[in-house]
Amino acid sequence: MTSQQLFYLIIFILVIDFIIDKYLDYLNAKHFDDEIPMLLDDVYDKEAYQKSQHYKKENFKFSSIISIFSFVLTIAFFFFDGFAYVDQLSRSISNHPILITLIFFGIIMLGSDILTTPLAYYQTFVIEE
């Protein structure tokens, strides 16, 4: 298997995983407007149930936006050689294999945290209200 084939296999797996995940999320979201089942009618308060369903809808919309953003960013990182750039940067800082690995993943995690912190803040303090 050539490196080109491996590259496209990884992209294919990422795309299939994303499609399946979004399809399953969609199937779950179709039932957000369902009424309380008859067996649980006396257990749940209708108003609290409606409020929880509204929260699920808002959270679903926002989570969908975040996952699409993350997917596009990951694919772009692959196609524009982002991982190769981070690897070169890591190797320019150290020659020790373990340190190179730690620096590589540290840069990836730092970048991920910088991009996702504002989104997590919005989800926690705006949607949770």
Image (tube, rainbow, N blue to C red):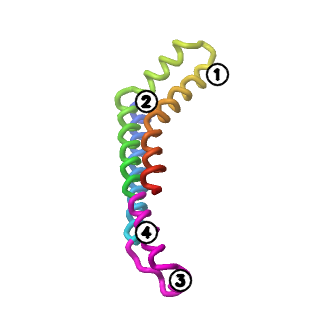
Residue 36 x %, y %: 46, 80
Give the residue type that dot 1 points to. Answer: Ile
Q: Which numbered disc, 2 or 4, marks the residue closer to the eye?
A: 4
Tag 2 secondary structure: helix
Give the residue type that dot 2 points to. Answer: Ser
From the image, tell me which residue sits under label 2.
3
Packing grade of label 1 (10 A; few <14, some 14-19, many >=20) is few
Using the numbered discs, state the Cα–Cα distance from disc 4 to disc 3 in whole angstroms. 15 Å
From the image, tell me which residue sits under label 3.
40
Give the residue type that dot 3 points to. Answer: Leu
Using the numbered discs, state the Cα–Cα distance from disc 1 to disc 2 in whole angstroms. 24 Å
From the image, tell me which residue sits under label 4.
53
Of marks 4 and 3, which one's residue comes earlier in the chain?
A: 3
User: Is 97 rendered above or below residue 32?
Assistant: above
Packing grade of label 3 (10 A; few <14, some 14-19, many >=20) is few
Residue 34 x %, y %: 40, 77
User: Which residues make up the magenta segment?
Assistant: 33-59
From the image, tell me which residue sits under label 1.
98
Identity of the residue drawn at 47% across and 56% down: 128
Of marks 2 and 4, which one's residue comes earlier in the chain?
A: 2
Identity of the residue drawn at 45% across and 57% down: 129
Identity of the residue drawn at 47% across and 74% down: 49
